[in-house]
Image (cartoon, rainbow, N blue to C red):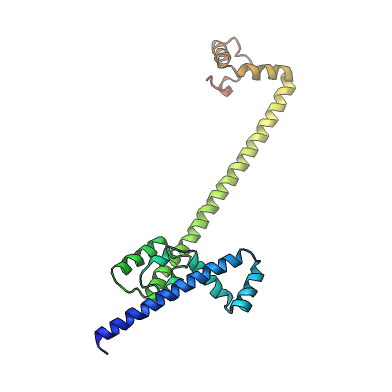
């Protein structure tokens, strides 16, 4: 055969393959419609007994039917379509394949699988680092919670001693007065002048706001 004859046959084969992909997508849509009305086990048995396809084939066809963006690619073969439904077939990969297809380039399945494998490898390498960061964040959060619990316990002990020493009524009145920033400022001024300094550790008092 001449080069022109080979090219013509290749074009006719690609046209038939494209029709095959369209038929697979239509079958995938039919499978999705049935799957929504059956349990998983019922669906698998129905696909095997009534349609005559395996579970893996049924799920590949349904996965393809869920990815309409792939169907717009030129020179799309079933194997190429299946490769592009992989988890790590990113939009960037699909866009690259689309660009090559529009330019008339025939993209091999092995090339697509290589691109997908590179993305998968990068994702798996990043996973331990993400787990390490997550673990560090969790430990820091747990340490902060423990510190907060310790401070709360110490504050509760001090509050109990204070109430025992001066009485709950006085503590309540001080707390009510402390809610007024003008009262807090006046108290600090009195302490600074010495009229309330006796018996108080001024350095431990909260600043006025």
State the image quarter where residue 184 is shown.
top right
Measuring 59% from the left and 79% from the top, which residue is drawn there? 52
- Quick one: which residue is furthest to the bottom in this view? 1
State the image quarter where residue 103 is shown.
bottom left
- Figure label count: 0
Measuring 32% from the left and 83% from the top, which residue is drawn there? 9
Measuring 48% from the left and 73% from the top, which residue is drawn there? 24
- Figure check: 154 above or below 115: above
In the displayed structure image, the side of residue 126 where residue 44 appears, left or right: right
In the displayed structure image, the side of residue 179 where residue 165 appears, left or right: right
State the image quarter where residue 74 is shown.
bottom left
In the displayed structure image, the side of residue 100 where residue 143 appears, left or right: right
Residue in front for this viewpoint, 150 or 141: 141
Give the percent coordinates (x, y) of residue 96.
34, 65
Residue in front for this viewpoint, 95 or 115: 95
Q: In which quarter of the image is the N terminus?
A: bottom left
Whether residue 78 can be seen here: no
Whether residue 4 can be seen here: yes
Give the percent coordinates (x, y) of residue 40.
64, 68
Residue in front for this viewpoint, 95 or 207: 95
Give the percent coordinates (x, y) of residue 51.
59, 77
- Figure check: 156 above or below 109: above
Residue in front for this viewpoint, 150 or 5: 5
Give the percent coordinates (x, y) of residue 199.
64, 16
């Amino acid at each position: 055969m001449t080069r022109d004859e080979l090219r013509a046959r290749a074009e006719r084969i690609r046209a038939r393959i494209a029709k095959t992909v369209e038929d697979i997508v239509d079958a995938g849509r039919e499978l999705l419609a049935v799957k929504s009305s059956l349990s998983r086990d019922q669906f698998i048995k129905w696909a095997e007994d009534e349609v005559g396809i395996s579970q893996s084939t049924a799920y590949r066809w349904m996965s393809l039917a869920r990815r309409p963006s792939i169907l717009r690619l030129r020179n799309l073969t079933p194997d190429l379509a299946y490769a592009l439904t992989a988890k790590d077939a990113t939009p960037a990969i699909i866009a690259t394949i689309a660009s090559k297809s529009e330019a008339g380039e025939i993209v091999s399945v092995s090339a697509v699988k290589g691109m997908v494998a590179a993305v998968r490898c990068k994702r798996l390498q990043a996973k331990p680092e993400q787990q390490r960061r997550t673990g560090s964040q969790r430990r820091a959060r747990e340490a902060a919670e423990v510190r907060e619990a310790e401070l709360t316990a110490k504050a509760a002990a001090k509050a109990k001693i204070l109430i025992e020493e001066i009485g709950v009524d006085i503590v309540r009145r001080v707390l009510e007065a402390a809610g007024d920033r003008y009262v807090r400022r006046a108290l600090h001024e009195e302490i600074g002048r010495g009229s309330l300094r006796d018996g108080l550790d001024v350095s431990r008092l909260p600043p006025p706001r």
